[in-house]
Image: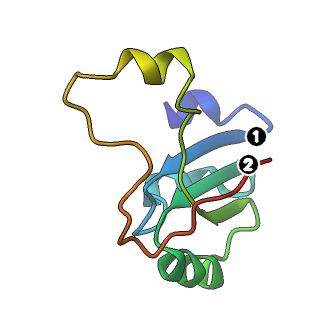
């Protein structure tokens, strides 16, 4: 996969739940890498962002998902999946859209 993508101008990665940073394998793309990394732990995201040396890697503190009324979300109702909205005891701040 890396060899095939090496010819592209840029390579993008979205990492949801990036509490330990992006995997070392992605760093092989060097300056071509554009990574957006999300985690609910605000303190961990601050640490990762401060330590990051690659300019194309961004860390974002927050939840990733779809609106509750989106068809995919409503289809999951009753299937034994984790509740939406995160852990109320989490250190994350839920973004406000409006």
For residue 75, side relative to residue 68 (left or right): left
User: What residue appears at the point 53 percent right and 76 percent down from the top-left corner?
Assistant: 42
Residue carrying label 1: 10
Q: CA distance from mark 2 to mark 1?
A: 4 Å
Q: How many marks?
A: 2
Tags 2 and 1 touching, CB below 8 Å:
yes
Which label is found at residue 59? none
Residue carrying label 2: 32
Which class describes the residues within 10 Å of circle 2: few (<14), some (14-19), or many (20+)? Answer: some
Element at label 2: helix
User: What residue appears at the point 44 percent right and 19 percent down from the top-left corner?
Assistant: 74
User: What residue appears at the point 71 percent right and 50 percent down from the top-left corner?
Assistant: 34
Give the percent coordinates (x, y) of residue 10: 76, 40
Which of the 4 image quarters holds residue 52?
Answer: bottom right
Element at label 1: loop
Q: Could one spot residue 27 in this view of the protein?
A: no
- Lower position in the chain sequence, tag 2 or tag 1: 1
């Amino acid at each position: 996969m890396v060899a095939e993508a090496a010819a592209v101008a840029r390579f993008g990665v979205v990492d949801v739940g990036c509490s330990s940073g992006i995997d070392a394998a992605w760093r092989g793309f060097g300056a071509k890498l554009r990574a957006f990394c999300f985690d609910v732990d605000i303190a961990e995201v601050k640490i990762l962002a401060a330590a990051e040396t690659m300019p194309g890697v961004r860390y974002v503190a927050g939840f990733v998902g779809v609106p509750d009324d989106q068809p995919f979300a409503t289809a999951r109702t009753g299937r034994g999946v984790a509740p939406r909205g995160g852990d109320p005891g989490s250190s994350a701040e839920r973004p406000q859209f409006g």
